[in-house]
Amino acid sequence: MSIAWSDSTPIYRQLKERVVAMVLDGELKEGDALPSVRQVAADYQLNPITVSRAYQELADEALVEKRRGLGMYVIDGAREKLLASERERFLKEEWPQVLARIERLGLKPEQLLAAKPINGAHA
């Protein structure tokens, strides 16, 4: 995990979002172990309580499970659950802003579809 921390959001939340992104991107697969709290705390010079809080939120959302003595693991179905919730969040929160900007700029659907991806983004 490579992370640049932002001052605008609590670090535990940023860490949680990074783990979510890793699951969505396939870097962490269902059944994979999360790095240990101690390892993440040491690697990123974080308080272990901060890491534990991020992991606990993931567990509360039923995305990971704690296996006593073994650590935290990504549960089966976590990626699909995340895709569904991220799609819903995008459509409710982000898309209205994107659509308003498209309309403000007077862009037409064919212009958007013909636009080339930037920086290797997928079309």
Image (tube, grey):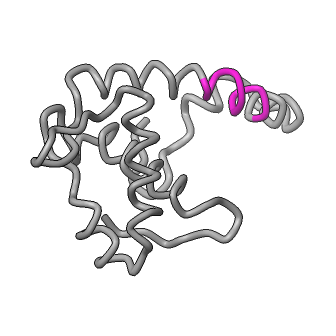
Q: Residue 46, position in %: x, y?
A: 43, 74
Q: Residue 32, position in %: x, y?
A: 14, 42
Closest to the observer: 25 or 103? 25
Looking at the image, residue 83 sits to the left or right of residue 1; the answer is right
Q: Per the image, is 91 magenta? A: yes
- Which quadrant is the N terminus positioned in? bottom left
Quadrant hosting residue 37: bottom left
Closest to the observer: 30 or 73? 73
Look at the picture and state if 14 lies above or below 92.
below
Q: Residue 101, position in %: x, y?
A: 81, 37
Looking at the image, residue 4 sits to the left or right of residue 98; the answer is left
Q: Main secondary structure of the magenta part?
A: helix
Q: How many marks?
A: 0
Question: Residue pushed farthest right?
Answer: 104
Closest to the observer: 28 or 60? 60
Q: Residue 62, position in %: x, y?
A: 36, 26
Look at the picture and state if 35 lies above or below 57.
below
Quadrant hosting residue 44: bottom left
Quadrant hosting residue 113: top right
- What range is drawn magenta here? 89-97
Q: Residue at x 73, y 34 (%)?
A: 98
Closest to the observer: 35 or 120? 35
Look at the picture and state if 116 lies above or below 81.
below
Q: Residue at x 40, y 38 (%)?
A: 58
Look at the picture and state if 112 lies above or below 88.
below
Q: Per the image, is 98 magenta? A: no
Looking at the image, residue 68 sits to the left or right of residue 61; the answer is left
- Which quadrant is the C terminus positioned in? top left
Q: Residue at x 20, y 23 (%)?
A: 76
